[in-house]
Image: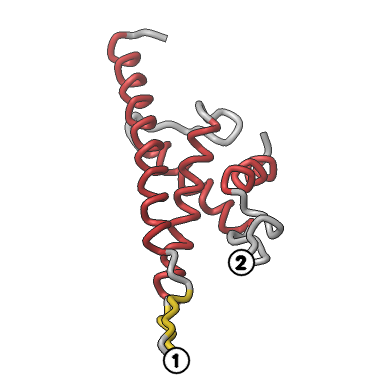
């Protein structure tokens, strides 16, 4: 799988297309941010002992790579929304503009929990295989 194909799968998972983002009328995440998110998750996985050197093609679970990279991308968006949130009041009507950080925090937490739980189980399995000489 190429990086471009993986980015498409992440966009599909997040439904991050301008025609589907009715309020934004644009993609929420740039290709560069999604690439950085993939690199972040690959690095996170590879640096967790036992140390590995997986790339996209050899990664043991593409769905979990997508889940982790999606969490990272949404975490970046969450920071942006937190920084740009504004309360607008006029004539007795209040509006919170760009008030998505809390919703994104819940989503990020769920995605990261799933990715991290899988990562720890996978790495424990690798440790057991290395200890007992299996594989």
Mark 2 or 1, which is nearer the eye?
Answer: 1
Say if 47 sits above or below 88 in the image: above
Which x, y percent locates residue 59? 53, 30
Task: Give the number of callouts.
Answer: 2
Left or right of residue 17: residue 89: left
Residue at 44 percent of width and 91 percent of height: 91
Q: How far apart in space, not on screen, are marks 2 and 1 (Cα)? A: 24 Å
- Mark 1 element type: loop
Q: Which residue corresponds to mark 2?
A: 23
Question: Which colouring convention does the figure follow?
Answer: secondary structure
Which x, y percent locates residue 33? 56, 58
Quadrant in which the N terminus is drawn: top right
> Picture quarter containing residue 100?
bottom left
Q: Which mark is residue 91?
A: 1
User: Front-most of 92 and 115?
Assistant: 92
Quadrant in which the C terminus is drawn: top left
Which x, y percent locates residue 49? 32, 32
Q: How crowded is mark 1: few (under 14 residues within 10 Å), some or many (20 or more)?
A: few
User: Front-most of 122 and 67?
Assistant: 67
User: Front-most of 83 and 123?
Assistant: 83
Left or right of residue 110: residue 9: right
Say if 36 sits above or below 41 in the image: below
């Amino acid at each position: 799988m190429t990086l471009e194909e993986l980015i498409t799968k992440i966009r599909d998972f997040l439904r991050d297309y301008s025609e589907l983002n009715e309020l934004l009328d644009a993609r929420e995440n740039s290709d560069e941010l999604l690439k950085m998110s993939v690199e972040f998750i690959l690095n996170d996985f590879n640096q967790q002992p036992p140390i590995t050197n997986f790339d996209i093609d050899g990664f043991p679970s593409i769905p979990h790579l997508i889940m982790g990279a999606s969490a990272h991308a949404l975490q970046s968006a969450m920071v942006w929304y937190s920084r740009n949130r504004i309360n607008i009041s006029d004539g007795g009507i209040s509006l919170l503009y760009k008030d998505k950080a809390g919703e994104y925090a819940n989503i990020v937490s769920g995605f990261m929990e799933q990715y991290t739980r899988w990562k720890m189980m996978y790495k424990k399995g690798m440790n057991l295989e290395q200890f007992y000489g299996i594989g």
